[in-house]
Amino acid sequence: QVQLEESGGGLVQAGDSLRLSCAASGRSFSSYAMGWFRQAQGKEREFVAAIRWSGGRTYYADFVKGRFTISGDNAKNTVYLQMNSLKPEDTAVYYCAASLGGAGTTTLRSYDYWGQGTQVTVSS
């Protein structure tokens, strides 16, 4: 069994920064990509960012381009999300996910394992 655990969420003010971390544990596996999604209260879960290990290509949702940066360590199945210039509309539960491959990197169905989420709250 694979577990993903996020950390680093919290309450910050608009303009502040946060760094989210996600680490995998349990059964050893080789991921094709890892990503971050978020879900605001009353809204659907949406794609935020992803990194495909082969070639190190990164993907971002338009609303975070220039503010968020995804990075990670393939060998450790660890991924980070550096979030700068946070806005109140970034408030959501942020979920880490890992893909075994074969179905892209920016949709929910691309991913096979999910963390429990970490709350990010940005006050104005």
Image: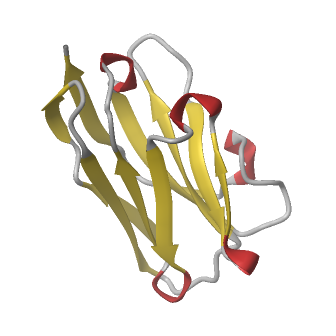
At horizontal 37% and vertical 53% (from top left) the residue drawn is: 82
| Location of residue 14 by image quarter | top left
| Location of residue 121 by image quarter | top left
Viewer-proximal residue among 79 and 42 = 79
- Up the image or down, 120 lies above or below 99; here it is above
Residue 28 percent across, percent down from the top left: 52, 87
Residue 98 percent across, percent down from the top left: 58, 62
| Location of residue 25 by image quarter | bottom left
Residue 104 percent across, percent down from the top left: 81, 54
Viewer-proximal residue among 116 and 66 = 66
- Answer whether residue 1 is visible to the viewer in this image: no
At horizontal 56% and vertical 20% (from top left) the residue drawn is: 44
At horizontal 74% and vertical 78% (from top left) the residue drawn is: 55
At horizontal 33% and vertical 42% (from top left) the residue drawn is: 84
- Answer whether residue 31 is visible to the viewer in this image: yes
- Up the image or down, 88 lies above or below 80; here it is above
